[in-house]
Structure formats: structure tokens, C-alpha cells
Image (cartoon, rainbow, N blue to C red):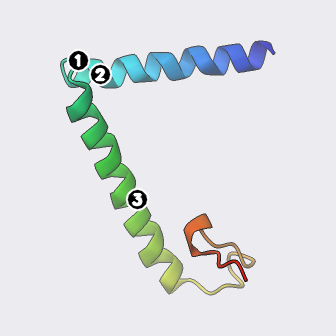
């Protein structure tokens, strides 16, 4: 339980740091975080297209897993 509390405190500190970077403007901070997320998702998509499935042992990003 102590590890969970420590993790929550660390995440809270990271949130405060991000907000401070944007002068407390939550909308700008959220926009930047989402922009980074989209960029990294695109990089993952490009990289996964260049790698063989055997290299990743069949792993696919969650959004590329198709349910039958």
C-alpha cells in the first residue's frame, strides 16, 4: 500500500510541474500532453510498420488488436 501512495504522490508532483510549465493554464498543458501522445502514437505506428512481427513476438498496440 505504501508503494501506491508513493506513486500517487509522484504523479501529483508531475501534474503540478506540468501545470507550472504552462503558468497554471490547464487547457494549454492538456493540449501539450495530448499533442505529445499523438506524436508518440504516430512514431509507434511508423516503427511497427517497419518491424517484423517476430521481432516484437506478436505484440501489437492495443488499438491495433482486432476482436473477432
The span from disc 2 to disc 3 (Cα, nearest Å) is 21 Å
Q: Position of residue 15 (x, y in %)?
A: 41, 23
The span from disc 2 to disc 1 (Cα, nearest Å) is 5 Å
Residue named by callout 2: 19
Q: Where is residue 18 in the image (x, y as percent from the top left)?
A: 33, 25
- Under tag 1, what secondary structure? loop
Q: What crowding class fits label 1: few (fewer than 14 Cα within 10 Å), some (14-19), or many (20 or more)?
A: few
Please indicate whether residue 67 sits to the left or right of residue 38 in the image. Answer: right
Q: What crowding class fits label 2: few (fewer than 14 Cα within 10 Å), some (14-19), or many (20 or more)?
A: some
Residue named by callout 3: 40
Q: What crowding class fits label 3: few (fewer than 14 Cα within 10 Å), some (14-19), or many (20 or more)?
A: few
- In depth, the one of 64 and 41 nearer the eye is 64
- 52 in relation to 23, above or below: below
Residue at 56% x, 83% y: name it. 51
Please indicate whether residue 11 sits to the left or right of residue 2 in the image. Answer: left
- Under tag 2, what secondary structure? helix
CB atoms of marks 2 and 1 within 8 Å? yes
The residue positioned farthest toward the front in the image shown: 68
The span from disc 3 to disc 1 (Cα, nearest Å) is 24 Å
Quadrant for residue 52, please give it. Answer: bottom right
- In depth, the one of 67 and 1 nearer the eye is 67
CB atoms of marks 3 and 1 within 8 Å? no
Residue at 42% x, 77% y: name it. 46
Q: Position of residue 47 (x, y in %)?
A: 47, 75
Residue named by callout 1: 24
Query: Marks 2 and 3: which is nearer the front?
Result: 2
Quadrant placement of the N terminus: top right
Q: Which of marks 3 and 1 is nearer the N terminus?
A: 1
Residue at 18% x, 18% y: name it. 23
Amino acid at each position: 500500500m505504501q508503494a501506491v501512495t508513493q506513486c500517487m504522490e509522484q504523479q501529483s508532483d508531475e501534474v503540478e510541474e506540468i501545470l507550472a510549465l504552462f503558468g497554471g493554464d490547464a487547457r494549454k498543458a492538456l493540449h501539450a500532453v495530448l499533442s505529445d501522445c499523438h506524436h508518440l502514437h504516430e512514431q509507434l505506428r511508423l516503427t511497427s510498420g517497419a518491424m517484423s512481427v517476430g521481432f516484437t513476438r506478436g505484440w501489437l498496440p492495443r488499438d491495433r488488436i482486432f476482436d473477432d
